[in-house]
Amino acid sequence: MGTFDTLVFQNAFWVFVGIVCGALIQFLFHYIISLSQRRNAKRLFRIEIEINSDVLAVLEADLTRKRELFVSKQQTDQDYYINLNDFNYTMVNPLINSGYFHAIAGSDGVRRYFKFMNDLNSKNALVLQQMLRAQDEENASIRMLNWLLDTRITEWKNTIALLKAKAGA
């Protein structure tokens, strides 16, 4: 009977060791996949930030050109058009859903990027165009363009800089 008890104990012991090793392997495997997903999420977010940074630079140059035209009173109807269609937010939605966006950006970064997204989109472009036309009718278009260039563009650049730092770009 003694050998039988020893065999039962050994079998139980090795089954337990197998279960523990299996659990550790699963945990390690999950951890490695999680690290990979986080790395990919950061990489995708850095790409989106870079795209939007480039588009912001184009917007700044366009607004500067518009200001010069308005100052010299050489604007046409086309110069009231403000293009915000090129800003890209397609990569951030999956990151928000997975929780990686909040982990990468932090609370301040999330708040500022959501404001950035609300400010720079096609719906807001129409509002800005209408404001520019209305301000021009009151001879205040240059003040509005100065506000956009000196205040808003600076704010948006600071948001991009903050997110670049948080994303490790």
Image (cartoon, rainbow, N blue to C red):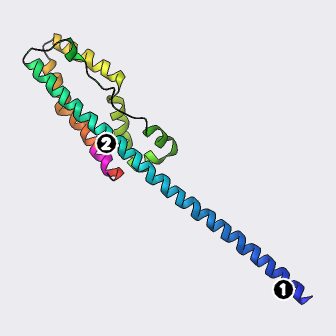
Q: Position of residue 160 (x, y in %)?
A: 29, 42
Rounded to the nearest angstrom, the CA distance separating label 1 from label 2 is 65 Å
**In the current view of this chain or complex, which residue is farthest to the bottom?**
2
117 in relation to 21, above or below: above
Residue 67 falls in image quadrant: top left
Residue 112 falls in image quadrant: top left
Q: Please state if 41 lies on the left or on the right of 61 as rendered.
A: right
Q: Position of residue 58 (x, y in %)?
A: 23, 32
Check disc 1: other Cα within 10 Å, few if <14, some if 14-19, many if 20+. Answer: few
Work out which quarter of the rendered image holds the N terminus and state it: bottom right
Relative depth, front residue between 48 and 152 = 48
Residue bounds of the magenta highlight? 161-165
The amino acid on which the numbered mark 1 sits, given as a three-letter code, is Thr
Q: Which residue is mark 1?
A: 6
Residue at the (20%, 11%) spot, across then down = 77
Q: Earlier in the sequence, mark 1 or mark 2?
A: 1
63 in relation to 22, above or below: above
Relative depth, front residue between 117 and 62 = 62
Residue at the (18%, 30%) spot, across then down = 61
Q: Is residue 42 magenta?
A: no
Q: Position of residue 159 (x, y in %)?
A: 29, 41
Secondary structure of the residue carrying numbered label 1? helix
Relative depth, front residue between 115 and 7 = 7
Residue at the (31%, 37%) spot, across then down = 52
Q: Please state if 118 lies on the left or on the right of 22 as rendered.
A: left
The amino acid on which the numbered mark 2 sits, given as a three-letter code, is Glu
Q: Which residue is mark 2?
A: 50
